[in-house]
Image (cartoon, helix red, strand yellow):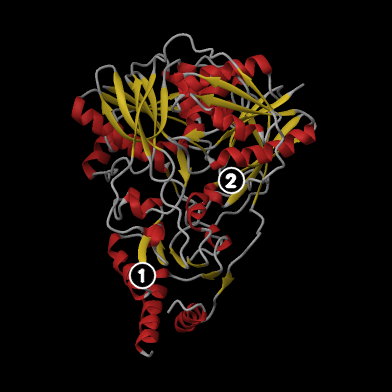
């Protein structure tokens, strides 16, 4: 029986959300092309994970090895390339995460198996694998086909597919002896590092004013700060602002920063790439100010203002202050 | 420390309006400004910083037609010593895998201790060229790099994970490190630099020079082929508040008041 592999991603004793998202999409696809859904679990002392995964897949392959305790792309590649060569899954799904991007391209190149990265959808059309990806910062979608092959590797964008609960499937668990013989030569995991926390915890704020690339100059930041103050909120930002060093890392909203759920999020000059949106889309109310009417942020926002932010922000701040003093 | 940096010349699209072209497989680029890919900009800066500290050289390599010289010149002005442009009609339609194969042929016989690439490109966003290149060269790699400390024979590297977390890993050298934005502060080009850069040569190599066959590159040598590009379907769209500035501000405040936010 042919298989569809889902590589379980875990970190610090937890299976990560993307694993369940991939299992959901993988289940749907495997039923359609009539193959078995197999979760592949690499780690050390991960029996508990195996139980969770067995509820969601036809089978779980476990490779237990101390050298797999923390993610290591070299060790993972050695094990996975062996499993894929032997079992020839129709498709291997890997998360498009910091781990996935370190692993999938070299794995695919070693096996010369076609790879599509950061996919937001995929389907088999006959024997051909067709994927949908986003390009140009999410402004354009691409439908693309992969070269015909008996096996494919695809990395899926986290947060794209909603993980669904299933009636426990009671899949079988198969322990596979670790194929790692020699030491891992090239890469060594040392430790996790958590940048020190600042004085403001944006994830606890009710009102957040987020600024992005459109703010252009550090001198324009006080205007946004005043708006945040007028609303009794805090200033946060998207990635470019942290890259420039204008705000510390702990003010960054998005996949590589914080996930927030305030009552109000005002996005100023933020284009709305998925990395940012995934960190704030669950805010109760989202208002976006951006002069580009096609900016993806307007697909996440409840209300939009298509205007020059340098004009709108001060006007809005004054109006709010008036409102407060009139009370 | 001899460092090779792979760069890409891309359109700046963050604030531009994008229109799909007549072929339906690309976008119209006439009105767009092209520049070095943002991630590569940080990779180049990191290479120049290493050279300034440890000596050695910086070589930039790219795949593209003559227009990309603009980006290569800027790299030379910013501190790169040499530039190589890989140009051939046969390279058109190459995906990240085919690009990595082209770069591999150009780089494999050059002397280097380290190869830096951007973690991804702002246009097609594959995030795979550096990693595939490492595999083809048979050397280690790591991606999403936010900090590099060079030690004897290896690099100690901070990788950016999700949720504000990083991991520290050691990678044996020579290696490919794919750089994440924010690792440094890319410098501006000095007038002096631009003047000096004009004298530096850009070496141009094609398919035959690299010992590649046509079927190894372009669409045929790729894993993935674009079938069509389209503007994403709108599932949810914000209600756009219109009117003069005061009117808009009043509408926002009304919305906030209704929810007890002011």
Whether residue B75 can be seen here: yes
**Image spot of residue A186 (x, y percent):** 39, 17
Q: Residue at x 55, y 63 (%)?
A: A298
Secondary structure of the residue carrying numbered label 1: helix
Nearest the viewer among A202 and B130 is A202
**Image spot of residue A25 (x, y percent):** 68, 40
* Vertical arrangement, residue B118 with respect to residue A43, above or below: below
Q: Determine the image quadrant of residue A152.
A: top right
Residue marked by disc 2: A134
Q: Determine the image quadrant of residue A260.
A: bottom left
Q: Chain of mark 1?
A: A
Q: Chain of mark 2?
A: A
Left or right: residue A102 versus residue B152 is: right
Total marks shown come to 2
Of badges 1 and 2, the one in the foreground is: 1
Nearest the viewer among B231 and B70 is B231
Q: CA distance from mark 1 to mark 2?
A: 32 Å
Q: Quadrant of the C terminus of chain B?
A: bottom left
Q: Residue at x 52, y 17 (%)?
A: A78
Q: Residue at x 38, y 74 (%)?
A: A231
Nearest the viewer among A22 and A307 is A22
Q: Is disc 1 in the same subunit as disc 2?
A: yes
Query: Which numbered dot is residue A228?
Result: 1
């Amino acid at each position: 029986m042919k298989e569809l592999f889902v590589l379980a991603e875990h970190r610090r004793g937890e299976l990560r959300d993307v694993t369940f998202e991939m299992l959901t999409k993988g289940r749907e696809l495997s039923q359609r092309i009539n193959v078995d859904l197999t979760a592949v679990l690499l780690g050390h002392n991960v029996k508990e994970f195996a139980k969770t995964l067995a509820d969601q897949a036809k089978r779980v392959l476990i490779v237990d090895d101390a050298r797999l305790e923390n993610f290591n792309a070299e060790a993972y590649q050695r094990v996975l390339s062996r499993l894929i060569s032997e079992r020839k899954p129709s498709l291997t799904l890997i998360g498009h995460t910091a781990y996935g991007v370190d692993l999938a391209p070299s794995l695919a190149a070693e096996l010369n198996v076609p790879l599509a990265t950061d996919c937001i959808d995929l389907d088999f059309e006959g024997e051909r694998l067709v994927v949908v990806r986003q390009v140009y910062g999410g402004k354009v979608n691409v439908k693309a086909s992969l070269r015909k092959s008996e096996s494919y590797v695809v990395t899926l964008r986290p947060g794209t597919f909603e993980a669904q609960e299933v009636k426990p499937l009671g899949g079988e668990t198969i322990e596979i002896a670790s194929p790692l013989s020699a030491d891992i030569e090239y890469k060594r995991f040392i430790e996790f590092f958590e940048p020190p926390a600042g004085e403001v915890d944006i994830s606890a704020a009710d009102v957040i004013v987020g600024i992005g690339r459109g703010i252009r100059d550090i001198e324009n930041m006080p205007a946004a700060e005043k708006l945040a103050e007028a609303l009794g909120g805090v200033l946060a930002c998207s990635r470019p602002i942290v890259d420039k060093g204008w705000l510390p890392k702990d003010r960054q909203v998005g996949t590589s920063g914080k996930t927030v759920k305030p009552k109000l999020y005002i996005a100023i000059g933020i284009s709305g790439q998925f990395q940012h949106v995934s960190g704030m889309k669950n805010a109760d109310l989202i208002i976006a100010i951006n002069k580009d009417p096609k900016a993806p942020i307007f697909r996440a926002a409840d209300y939009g203002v298509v205007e020059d932010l340098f004009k709108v922000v001060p006007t809005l701040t004054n109006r709010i202050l008036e409102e407060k003093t009139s009370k | 420390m001899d460092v090779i940096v792979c760069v890409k010349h891309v359109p700046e699209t963050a604030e531009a309006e994008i229109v799909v072209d007549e072929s339906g497989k690309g976008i119209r680029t006439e009105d767009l400004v092209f520049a070095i890919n943002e991630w590569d900009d940080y990779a180049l800066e990191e290479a120049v910083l290493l050279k300034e500290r440890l000596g050695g050289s910086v070589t930039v390599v790219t795949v593209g037609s003559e227009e990309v010289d603009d980006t290569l010149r800027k790299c030379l002005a910013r501190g790169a010593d040499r530039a190589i442009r890989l140009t051939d009609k046969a390279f058109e339609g190459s995906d990240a895998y085919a690009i990595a194969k082209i770069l591999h042929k150009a780089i494999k016989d050059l002397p280097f201790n380290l190869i830096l690439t951007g973690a991804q490109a702002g246009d097609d966003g594959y995030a795979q060229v550096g990693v595939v290149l490492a595999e083809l060269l048979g050397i280690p790699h790591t991606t999403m790099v936010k900090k590099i400390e060079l030690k004897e024979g290896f690099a100690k590297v901070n990788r950016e994970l999700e949720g504000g977390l990083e991991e520290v890993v050691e990678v044996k050298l020579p290696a490919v490190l794919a750089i994440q934005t924010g690792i440094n502060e890319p410098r501006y080009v000095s007038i002096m630099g631009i003047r000096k850069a004009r004298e530096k040569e850009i070496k141009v190599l094609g398919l035959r020079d690299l010992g590649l066959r046509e079927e190894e590159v372009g669409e045929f040598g790729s894993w993935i082929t674009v079938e069509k590009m389209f503007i994403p379907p709108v599932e949810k769209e914000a209600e756009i508040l219109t009117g003069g500035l005061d009117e808009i501000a009043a509408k926002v405040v009304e919305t906030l008041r209704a929810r007890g936010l002011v």
